[in-house]
Image (tube, rainbow, N blue to C red):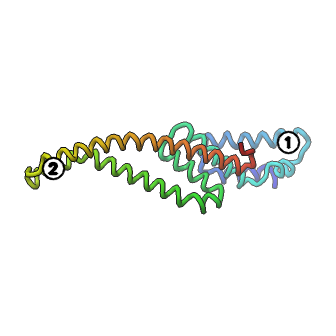
Amino acid sequence: MKRNEFMKKLEAYLAKVPQHDRKDMLYDFDEHFTVGIENGKTEEEVVEELGDPHLIAKDLIADYQMIRAEKGPSVPNTSRMVFATIGLSFFNLVFLLGPVIGLIGVYFSLCVTAFSFTVSPLLAVLWGIFTGFEDFMIQFFMSVTLCGIGILLSIAIIHIGKFSYKIMLRYAKFNIKVMKGGKIS
């Protein structure tokens, strides 16, 4: 494979990366060719040293998603990071996808529960308006108690979410390190 063919394939595999970042990535590999040729190597030898452009693109995309996720823990960045990491390994797909989806489901249900508890005083007032205020005081004080529990649960959920995000990010870094053949410390 020649330089042009390698670069075209790499660019095609990196099509999902924004143009500016993709140019930077491609420039680095263009430099590899320039330095290799200056050192007396042929284009084929440089391509052989670099490896398969498809695998290189997978690693570059995973690293790119990791950097984006580190910059800001937004839902799209996090999901891209998670899916890039899962895409690297069949092991992760088989053994981690189920538990991760389960944990996300539990987290989502806790969020819904906290929200329900928090808005329960409003629901108690609406219930009283439509059905009468016979047992209103008991229902209202129970709903205020649930509201307090909901607020405390919301605070706990925020901390759990931040902690879970850090754990996912750390695991993703570890996974990429293992996939690249890095030393596990």
Q: Are marks 2 and 1 in contact (CB under 8 Å)?
A: no
* Front residue (pair 66, 53): 66
106 in relation to 23, above or below: below
Give the percent coordinates (x, y) of residue 114: 33, 47
In the drawing, does residue 94 fall left or right of residue 40? Answer: left
In the drawing, does residue 18 fall left or right of residue 44? Answer: left
Taking the spot 12% from the left edge, 48% from the top edge, the residue there is: 136
Rounded to the nearest angstrom, the CA distance separating label 2 from label 1 is 75 Å
Give the percent coordinates (x, y) of residue 87: 62, 56
User: In the image, what residue type sits under mark 2?
Assistant: Leu
Dot 2, how many residues are within 10 Å of its Cα: few (below 14), some (14-19), or many (20+)?
few
82 in relation to 93, above or below: above
Dot 1, how many residues are within 10 Å of its Cα: few (below 14), some (14-19), or many (20+)?
some
User: Mark 1: which secondary structure?
Assistant: helix
Taking the spot 32% from the left edge, 41% from the top edge, the residue there is: 151
Which residue sits furthest top?
Answer: 71
- Label for residue 166? none
Q: Note whether residue 8 is visible.
A: no
User: In the image, what residue type sits under mark 1?
Assistant: Gly
Q: Note whether residue 144 is visible.
A: yes
Residue on which the image places disc 1: 36
- Label for residue 126? 2
Give the percent coordinates (x, y) of residue 120: 23, 48
* Front residue (pair 31, 116): 116
* The C terminus lies in quadrant: top right
* The N terminus lies in quadrant: bottom right
User: Mark 2: which secondary structure?
Assistant: helix
Q: Quadrant of residue 24?
A: top right
In the drawing, does residue 17 fall left or right of residue 54? Answer: left
Give the percent coordinates (x, y) of residue 15: 62, 51
Q: Quadrant of residue 63?
A: top right
